[in-house]
Image: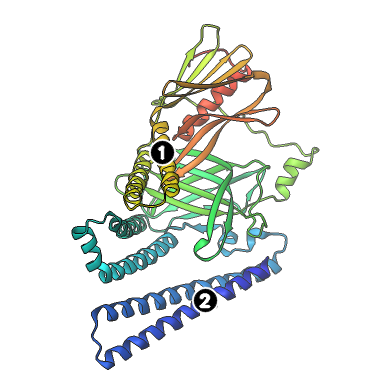
Amino acid sequence: MRFMNKVVLIIRLCISLMFIAAGLTIWGILLHVLQTGDQSRELITILSFMGTAFFGVGLGSTWWVLRQMRAVRRRAILRRQHPESPWLWRDDWARGRIRSSATSTMMIVWPAALLWNGLTFVTMSMAWDDLSRDLFQRKNPMALIALLFPLVGMGLVLWAIRATLQWRKYGVSVFEMASVPGILGGSLRGVVRTRVPLWPERGIHATLACIRQITIGSGRERRTTEYILWQDERIIGRDDVIRDPAGSLIPIAFDIPSSPPATDDERPGGRILWRLSVTAEVPGVDYCAHFEVPVFATASSQAMTLDADVPLPHRPEPESPTRPLHTPIRLRPTPGGGMMFIFPPRWSPKIVLLLLVILLGWSGMLTLIWRSGAPLLFIIVAGVFDILLVFALLITFFRSDRVTIEGDTVRIEHRFLGVKIARTMPCHQITDVRPLPISRLGNTSYYNIRIITASGKQVETGHSITDWQEAKWVADRMKRYILGHTTVSAA
């Protein structure tokens, strides 16, 4: 695996140098065109942009590859020096001072935005006469498709501007670990040092997640997918944030079970990383910082999990999560002495807006395809996807769930526009109820409630909860009722 990483870097370096050579060649052609007296505006614009784009992309990627090569060489030296301590193979991990990724995000988004908009500008400039003729004289609706490219470019610029504003306002945050590494079967503790004071009214949201990151394909087909293997969250009250002359110190403390896998950059089935995310809603641009932290199994975690002769340190039982003040979830006693959990329809403005934009864009595309006389099969396939988008939007507005716990039975209902889908299961077959992170949009995470049986079956309910404390509270209450650890009460 390490040999293949070196081969990939060498290939990328060769490609980067080819881009630089192509840019210099195009500039040479442009110089020749100018010397021969050909003053074609379109040709000069195309050659100028293409030469700059190729040279810029090649120069930037060469710089990045050389940095990666230096990091690989440094990592190999540290690996030989500390073969049994992989958390010392990175300088920032070894020092216990990990910088956030704000700068890297900005440096990736801006070149992508400039390149996309540059290509769009050159292309639209060359084709504007024909495009305007199709739009205003021939009334050809298919020409509207070309306008999607500048819209995408505007979205990239807005993203880049937001990343820049966030970087200018908050700078680079640093996570200072109390001890290195974070320990499986132990804990991860430290403080996040920010450059500006943070006093959000709703507190600061910290998330620690174990993620499997799988990358498939290459070039334009390269795709990276992340799967959350384990996650925990904390709400840090504003009174717990430590005042500092240079900004704020945000205390971080997570207990880590021994079951998730350790950090592993060379795992064949996809690299394993542990990510600490800290977010806060503040006026203007929200605070958001991500840190890739080292979490490993050490001698301490082995002693805690394997050595039965060593007494475990006493840890107090965690307190039951408290009911959030503004939760829409209702608990209603049933006539038979049980309890019903009612999850009303709840929709997120971000998800609704995203679905509406996709639906309107796809519906417009479908209309253009239909009017252009495309094959019937293509129109049917596109229409089915359009119907699915409408269905997804309706589910967002009208889906509700109910979980009724009565006697030794749990009844789970999914309701949608008067249609009910229900299933029942005995309480004694249920072993756990836990909140499940299902997706993330921007800085907002969404959770379902997962009910797990002794046979391994899993049933999900309570869709799209956006508050981690709310998800923990309802899962805890449901588990207590199912396992009979509390009396029936609507408290």
Residue highlighted by disc 2? 15
Pick the front one: 291 or 375:
375
Residue highlighted by disc 1? 387
Label whose residue precedes the other's in the sequence (2 or 1): 2
Q: Secondary structure at mark 2?
A: helix
Q: Residue at x 63, y 28 (%)?
A: 432
Pick the front one: 181 or 479:
479
Q: Residue at x 64, y 61 (%)?
A: 88
Q: Left or right? Give the position of 8 relative to 322.
A: right
| Residue 137: x %, y % from top left | 18, 60
The amino acid type of the residue labelled 1 equals Ile
Q: Is residue 215 above or below residue 324?
A: below
Q: Is residue 11 visible?
A: yes
In the displayed image of the protein, which residue is found farthest to the bottom?
Answer: 36
Q: Within 10 Å of the Cα at label 2, are there few (<14), some (14-19), or many (20+) other Cα atoms?
A: some
Q: Is residue 70 visible?
A: no
In the displayed image of the protein, which residue is found farthest to the top?
Answer: 335
The amino acid type of the residue labelled 2 equals Ile
Q: Within 10 Å of the Cα at label 1, are there few (<14), some (14-19), or many (20+) other Cα atoms?
A: few
Q: Quadrant of residue 435?
A: top right
Question: Circles 2 and 1: CB distance less than 8 Å?
Answer: no
| Residue 325: x %, y % from top left | 40, 25
